[in-house]
Amino acid sequence: MLARALRALMVWLTSLPFARRVITESPIGRGVARRFVAGDTLDDAVKVAGDLNDRGLGAMLDLLGENVTNEEQAERAAAGYAAALRRIEATGLADANISIKLTQLGLDISEELCLTNCERVLRAANGTLVMIDMESSDYTERTIAMYEKLRAGHDNIGICLQAALHRTPTDVRRIAGPGVPIRLAKGAYLEPPDIAIAHPREVARAFARLGATILALGATLHVATHDPGLIAGARRNVLARGIPRERYEFQMLYGIRRDLQESLRSQGSPVRVYIPYGSEWYPYLTRRLVERPANVWFFLSNLFRR
């Protein structure tokens, strides 16, 4: 009840024109945004990706936006993803790929439109890995079904699964197999208890179990968390089992736990940074806060963390 009340309050606050104006137009607000978002343009994202690559860190470009309402917006998003893939190739980035959101490519409009736009993106990929983001539980089944259709014709595609959802152990067994990239995240969305695990400790336990299962089934595991305990446990597991570097990596959001990113890199672990960019950065930041009010402290603490 308290969490839902806080969420309602955050929805109201971030929807106020005054709040948006303060954050998007003030130097402090834009400074906070630039701590977690590469910038408004693809050029900004590519520069950040290049800097990360120079430091031995991989990059994943994420064009911000979701839940488009017409075909033109969906096609524009597909063109933006395709442009990012062409730029990765043209720039010769050492280690970069992209992540896509199906509602940004038209899933709310029609599955046929979304599939067409996904195929357009994959044609531009030329072998570069394309990962599908997982959105709220309303989209889980449709997202997995779309992934399965695309995976049938493309090896360079993977998907994100959320450890908090009760259905995820079944989804792992459904999807995981040799060569399949799976990005495992805790799940940022505030879901009802009949759909998701509520207690953070139980979510962490589920994350650890699912990560081990994904590796046992031969899939490639992307450990997408900033939780030091989960990261340490996953690292112990892959080292103890002799899992090759090609089958796992640690992933973190741009601007969060840079110290941990560098520590893992210095220990020889593969690390990739998820780089949001685009003009829709205000909705991105506010959604992260609204989805789970505890994220307010998470972002503020990381803003001042070195």
Image (cartoon, rainbow, N blue to C red):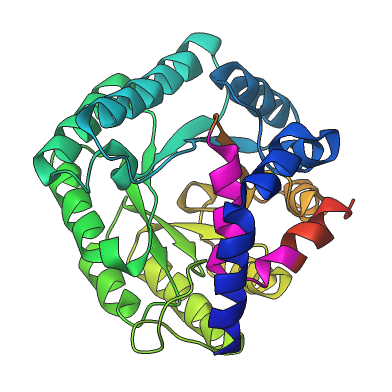
Q: Nearer the viewer, residue 153 or 294?
A: 294
Residue at image point 72% right, 69% down: 228
- In percent of width and height, residue 295 lies at 67, 66
Residue at image point 68% right, 27% down: 48
Magenta part, dominant SS: helix
Residue 191 vs residue 256: left or right?
left
Residue at image point 66% right, 51% down: 269
- In percent of width and height, residue 117 lies at 22, 31
Q: Nearer the viewer, residue 115 or 193?
A: 193
Would residue 113 be visible to someone looking at this image?
yes
Residue at image point 61% right, 52% down: 16
- Quarter of the figure with residue 81: top left
Residue 182 vs residue 41: left or right?
left
Q: Write the start and end of the magenta stretch as one range.
A: 280-296
Residue 108 vs residue 66: left or right?
left
Q: Nearer the viewer, residue 124 or 239?
A: 124
- Quarter of the figure with residue 124: top left
